[in-house]
Amino acid sequence: MTAPLKSIEGTGDISSVMREIGLRAHAASRVLALAPAEQKNRALAGMAAAVREQASAILSANAEDVAEAKAAGVVAGAFLDRLSLDPTRVEAIAAGIKAVGALKDPVGVVTESWTRPNGMRIERVRVPLGVIGIIYESRPNVTADAAVLCLKAGNAAILRGGSDSMRSSRAILAALASGLEAAGLPQPAVQLVPTRDRAAVGLMLQGLDGNIDVIVPRGGKSLVARVQAEARVPVFAHLEGVCHVFVHRTASLDMAKKIVLNAKMRRTGVCGAAETLLVDRGCATINLKPLVEMLIAAGCEVRGDAATQAIDKRVKAATEEDWGTEYLDAIIAVKVVDDIAAAIAHIERYGSHHTDAIVADDGVAAARFLSEVDSAIVLHNASTQFADGGEFGFGAEIGIATGRLHARGPVGVDQLTTFKYRILGNGQTRP
Amino acid sequence: MTAPLKSIEGTGDISSVMREIGLRAHAASRVLALAPAEQKNRALAGMAAAVREQASAILSANAEDVAEAKAAGVVAGAFLDRLSLDPTRVEAIAAGIKAVGALKDPVGVVTESWTRPNGMRIERVRVPLGVIGIIYESRPNVTADAAVLCLKAGNAAILRGGSDSMRSSRAILAALASGLEAAGLPQPAVQLVPTRDRAAVGLMLQGLDGNIDVIVPRGGKSLVARVQAEARVPVFAHLEGVCHVFVHRTASLDMAKKIVLNAKMRRTGVCGAAETLLVDRGCATINLKPLVEMLIAAGCEVRGDAATQAIDKRVKAATEEDWGTEYLDAIIAVKVVDDIAAAIAHIERYGSHHTDAIVADDGVAAARFLSEVDSAIVLHNASTQFADGGEFGFGAEIGIATGRLHARGPVGVDQLTTFKYRILGNGQTRP
């Protein structure tokens, strides 16, 4: 058993500690890559049990984090809510681990296979990515959520949580470590960076001498922007979700109302929440007013173009900035567009290639929208709030990616793997 | 029709020209992404015809390049061979374009689809990557080979060829441009960087303001190393192919001889050529001597460990450096290893995660090797020289990748695409 790294706060020797973490993670990743599903699931079951058993230790560590934040002047609000655990949230962590255990193991699955004319059989088989670096903020539950998804897909995880939640993360890590130990898996399969020094993040973004294969940032826009700007290794992330609903002239008003309301207001703080409503001029006379009135009645602030302002005097004027803004709040920008081409052009110009929906009865228009809108997820007659790994049936997700390569859209356990080619011959040589 | 960019050599205004190239490529990529297969194939057919029609112009441009290289003191050899075209090679370029036209169009193919309990249908559909930057050296044929693979997969290409072959590349580009024009596709679908200034490469590696999605380097190790070290966008490449053949104790000697000879000597200059032979101690007494004698008889220099040197006095001593060397020549390093575990450990330590093979009768040993060796391509009882897109049945390849993400192994037209999720609903909202 590898001894856990001690906290090195104040020693200043971050480079060598981080290098060592990278080497340990790489070595552990080779063990995990070959671990059978049963062994990984045993570790996950042990982790879930340990989180439950150690709930009081986790809660008291968290209470210290919360007390420190309050002492530092943080008052009640979103930050404190994200940082705080209670027995229900700890139980949710344990239940989440158990749910990941129940997912299908992606490793070893043959996704394609074919036989060549010379008799060679070629198989494309899923293998783990290797080592995944997770950089997150104050939510201590990410420590468990991210680590267990990585483990399920056979990857080692290097976790760098927020300074504010370090005690909570350490307490959760201790529970994860018990699960690894019980299953005979190496402790460095899940490591927590043992320092609050922000230089550790910079070192992770450089890839720890090639020992980090992918970075996943989990947090606000400034964190993601820094990671995307500085990372020298691939990043699975989205900077923002400026998601659109386009109501086509053939849309049924009832369906449009239902979808727009859900896309905007079900939860306003998720990345799949709609931020802009585009209404086809061909149906604006009939549909615009009821849609705007519905949104205002639901408590949503509406910022519109001239045509929308003319409908209802409660509509504020949208500025150029509004079209590209991810409000993550009960605010929506509304614009009347000339036709489907104008809607697609607007989305290309202002969108973030995350998730965009069309409401239309006309299948030809819908097909055009789905084809021409260059986003990770495009929907016809369904809410943008389905942009979620759970809703896709992936069981769980580590996030949503808007990059073009490898993982796009929800990143679940399958997306945390890569592949290799396995060739089975009986003596073939190349002419 | 967009006017072609003039050569800007000596103007020093590289940044703005490259920015413009990036913007044009991005705009063209959106057109290509939606172009039907028939239109792309019409362009390819036009390109092949134009290469044939313009063969004499291409050959005389090439003659100027060759004359300049000779005037600069280049003597006959590999460099001049790579640079030189003749009627046979020009015909091969045209035939290659035609062959790409015959490949199946990957764009729009639904690779997975499923229906959710709420009735929503989710489809994972192939879409182009976007804009691909190709950075290559003296071979003028890459201008056509790379551009047409990108085009087939719906991508725009920005080509930055070697300074030595610029006239040849321009002449080939003119033929490609005729094909684009005849099919009504935008000229900036294929652009050639119009300057020999190396700063253009640096700007491409930075991604031209987000307008390059992937970089593919085609050339020697120093080019690939520079691209991998500096690129801020994903790279499909392999630095080197230090490929191994492991002869297991259960291998048939006949098969081992056949595969080793082919893996090493069929062509020594390809990345899938074997560079190291590992022989299981359990069969070394019988197999080592005939394998070594066969290699020497075939004109291969053998550098061995002590056990191999003891077999034949013509075997030179292998140094530590030999185990990690990609000779690309008729030289092989030979080592006797204790068992399959030692073979796998050797490959993990010295290999390049490209292509490695085991020769064995025992299926359990073979399965272990294929599972534990962490390379893009692993083979059982087949030659490492099958590491090639054509041999995989991909029709053509732009190269072989050893990175872990997205494209691994041969990169053909399918690997030059990404995907999006298309969701078909009938009014679903998220609870």
Image: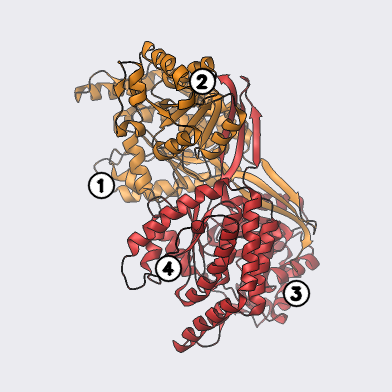
Chain colours: A red, B orange
Q: Between marks 2 and 1, how big is the CA–CA gap?
A: 38 Å
Q: Between marks 3 and 1, how big is the CA–CA gap?
A: 58 Å
Label at residue B12: 1
The disc numbered 4 marks a residue on which chain? A
Give the secondary structure at mark 3.
Answer: helix
Q: Which residue is mark 4?
A: A194
Q: Between marks 4 and 3, how big is the CA–CA gap?
A: 55 Å
Give the secondary structure at mark 2.
Answer: helix
Give the secondary structure at mark 1.
Answer: loop
Label at residue A290: 3
- Taking B400 as reference, is A155 above or below it? below
Quarter holding residue B85: top left
Quarter holding residue A291: bottom right
- Taking A245 as reference, is B43 above or below it? above
Q: Amino acid at mark 2?
A: Ala
| Position in image of residue B60 (x %, y %) | 33, 20
Given this view, does label 4 or label 2 mark the residue nearer the observer? 4
- Taking B404 as reference, is A11 above or below it? below
Q: Between marks 4 and 2, how big is the CA–CA gap?
A: 59 Å
| Position in image of residue B103 (x %, y %) | 60, 29
* Nearest the eye: B239 or B153: B239
Given this view, does label 2 or label 3 mark the residue nearer the observer? 2
Q: Which residue is mark 2?
A: B95
At a point 48% along the width and 69% down the height, the residue shown is A161
First reached walking from the N terminus: tag 4 or tag 3: 4
At a point 33% along the width and 61% down the height, the residue shown is A15
Given this view, does label 2 or label 1 mark the residue nearer the observer? 2
The disc numbered 3 marks a residue on which chain? A
* Nearest the eye: A111 or B109: A111
Label at residue A13: none
